[in-house]
Image (spheres, rainbow, N blue to C red):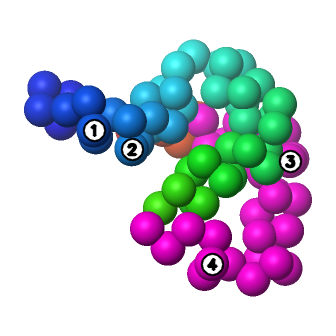
Amino acid sequence: MCEQTSFDFARAYWHWFMLVSPAPFPETLIRANPDLYLKHTIGARSAGLASFTPAAYAEYLRCLSDPATAHGISKTFAQA
């Protein structure tokens, strides 16, 4: 996959490349502003945030604000 990565792919999936960085870099960036991170990941997809009810988005934000969740996300990508 990396050999065929284009600029457009890397730009669309920038968070994949950030998440494989050594800890605590990814989780520090996520926790600095979890709302901004969500808006630029799930909110940037074709459906945007329209498919999320305010309650569902609030739950995503609550979970992502937990240090263990941010660490778990980056650890999962680092092991992939």
Q: Name the one closer to the observer, 14 or 76.
A: 14
Q: CA distance from mark 1 to mark 4?
A: 24 Å
The amino acid marked with disc number 1 is Asp
Identify the residue at horizontal 43%, vertical 29% (top origin): 17
Q: Please tell me the numbered disc located at residue 65.
A: 3
Q: Residues within 10 Å of mark 4 (few under 14, many from 20)?
A: few
From the image, give the main secondary structure of the stretch colored magenta.
Answer: helix
| Residue 54 is one of the magenta-drawn residues | yes
Q: CA distance from mark 3 to mark 2?
A: 23 Å
N-terminal label among 3 and 4: 4
Q: Quadrant of the N terminus?
A: top left
Magenta stretch bounds: 46-74
Q: CA distance from mark 1 to mark 3?
A: 29 Å
Helix or strand or loop: what does disc 1 sit on? helix
Helix or strand or loop: what does disc 2 sit on? helix
Identify the residue at horizontal 67%, vertical 53% (top origin): 39
Identify the residue at horizontal 83%, vertical 69% (top origin): 59
Q: Please tell me the numbered disc located at residue 12.
A: 2
In this rendering, position of residue 11 left or right of residue 44 = left
Identify the residue at horizontal 26%, vertical 30% (top origin): 7
Q: Name the one closer to the observer, 63 or 8.
A: 8
| Residue 53 is one of the magenta-drawn residues | yes
Q: Please tell me the numbered disc located at residue 50.
A: 4
